[in-house]
Amino acid sequence: KAGVTQTPRYLIKTRGQQVTLSCSPISGHRSVSWYQQTPGQGLQFLFEYFSETQRNKGNFPGRFSGRQFSNSRSEMNVSTLELGDSALYLCASSPGTGGATTQPQHFGDGTRLSIL
Amino acid sequence: DQQVKQNSPSLSVQEGRISILNCDYTNSMFDYFLWYKKYPAEGPTFLISISSIKDKNEDGRFTVFLNKSAKHLSLHIVPSQPGDSAVYFCAAVSGTPRKRADKLIFGTGTRLQVFP
């Protein structure tokens, strides 16, 4: 069974630009969550999508947005990039119907975003 | 405000000995916890979890202990192997109701190195 696939693996952008990251969940999984990992901050929750609807949201500014398509694939967009947005962005999928207590999230290998 | 804390950024243990990784949390509403392991250039992998109705959960060489009164959990690895060298993240489930819209609150991670 294929795992969670994130593209691209690496990305370099400059301040002020915008970026779109892609995540393909495990087949059959309907929930996709996004996390930002930075040194010293651990993984911080961005948002979760289920059946094309944002179901939960973290404490990030509106420059961070996402969407989910009917095939459960998800994209995350960051506009007006800042130096502090340099991070590893991780996507995780789960069936989404039983909650994390019964269905641990499966993570992709992430997209490393560097802002110059 | 870091609701899940891993105060030891690194730990070094000899092969065959016990590794103990600690995690503290501040929110008494958290009632389900998970441990993830992360190798460089890969996404986190689910390791083991525990519900607050238990104080111990064991899976092979891995055991998680939960002390609710102290808001503390620990992961024991016995015996430690060089392949266990990775970053370990503790996470708490946040979200109500728990069967929907779960999000994981992660600690900052502990880097474990197991040497021969």
Image (cartoon, coloured by chain):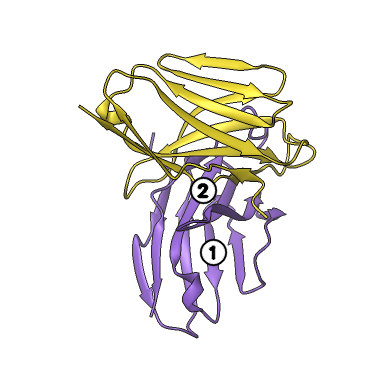
Chain colours: A purple, B yellow
Q: How many marks?
A: 2
* Tag shown at residue B108: 2
Residue A93: x %, y % from top left: 53, 43
Q: Residue furthest bottom?
A: A16
Local crowd size for mark 2, using a 10 Å CA cut-off: few (<14), some (14–19), many (≥20): many
Residue at image mark 1: A76
Does the rendering let one see residue A103?
A: no
Residue for point 60% across, 16% down? B56
Q: Is residue A7 above or below residue A55?
A: below
- The answer as to whether the residues below labels 1 and 2 share one chain is no
Quarter of the figure with the C terminus of chain B: top left
Residue for point 74% across, 26% down? B69
Q: Secondary structure at mark 2?
A: loop
Amino acid residing under circle 1: Met
In this rendering, position of residue A46 left or right of residue A6: right
Q: Is residue B70 above or below residue B42?
A: above
